[in-house]
Image (cartoon, rainbow, N blue to C red):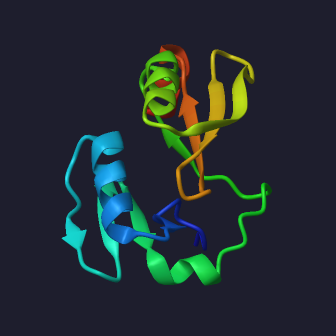
Amino acid sequence: MEQFLGLSTVIYGVTDIAEARAWYAQLLQKEPYFDSDCYVGFHLGHCELGLNPDARSAISRADGVIAYWAVADMAAQVERLGAMGARQHSDVVDVGEGVLMASFLDPYGNIIGLIEHSQAVSEDSNQ
């Protein structure tokens, strides 16, 4: 039996949860399903993005760990994140077979990875 079933939750530590809630609601174009002073959660497909002010002291933002969120249009999201004040962490790179990857730093120092799969790759993974 598989022990790891896939990505479930990514938690970003934030300094101001109300400000971060608004920023991520704008980025994700949706309201959180859970919203409190100690945790804000957004459902994204089969995953969850959580915002947690208490995680700030426990999280070391080493560049070795990046969660990549699937996007349909990398160029549009790169432009949008830049307009929202996110700083580019890594350039857009074609890693082969039409798969594009890039990353940004949100206003709180968390790394947001983006990945766009070509239509052919997406169709293969759905079979």
Q: Nearer the viewer, residue 23 or 127?
A: 23
The answer to whether 123 is drawn above or below residue 13 in the figure is above
Left or right of 64: which side holds 86?
A: left
Q: Residue at x 36, y 51 (%)?
A: 24
Q: Residue at x 63, y 23 (%)?
A: 100
Q: Residue at x 78, y 62 (%)?
A: 62
The answer to whether 27 is drawn above or below residue 75 in the figure is below
Left or right of 80: which side holds 4?
A: right
The answer to whether 75 is drawn above or below residue 57 in the figure is above
Q: Residue at x 65, y 32 (%)?
A: 102
The answer to whether 6 is drawn above or below residue 120 in the figure is below
Q: How many marks?
A: 0
Q: Nearer the viewer, residue 38 or 74?
A: 38
Left or right of 42: which side holds 49?
A: right
Left or right of 74: which side holds 27?
A: left
Picture quadrant of residue 110: bottom right
Relative image position of residue 18 (x, y in whole percent): 31, 66
Relative image position of residue 97 (x, y in whole percent): 68, 16
Q: Nearer the viewer, residue 85 or 80?
A: 85
Location of the N terminus (image quadrant) = bottom right
Picture quadrant of residue 52: bottom left
Relative image position of residue 72 (x, y in whole percent): 42, 24
Relative image position of residue 90 (x, y in whole percent): 73, 34
Location of the C terminus (image quadrant) = top left
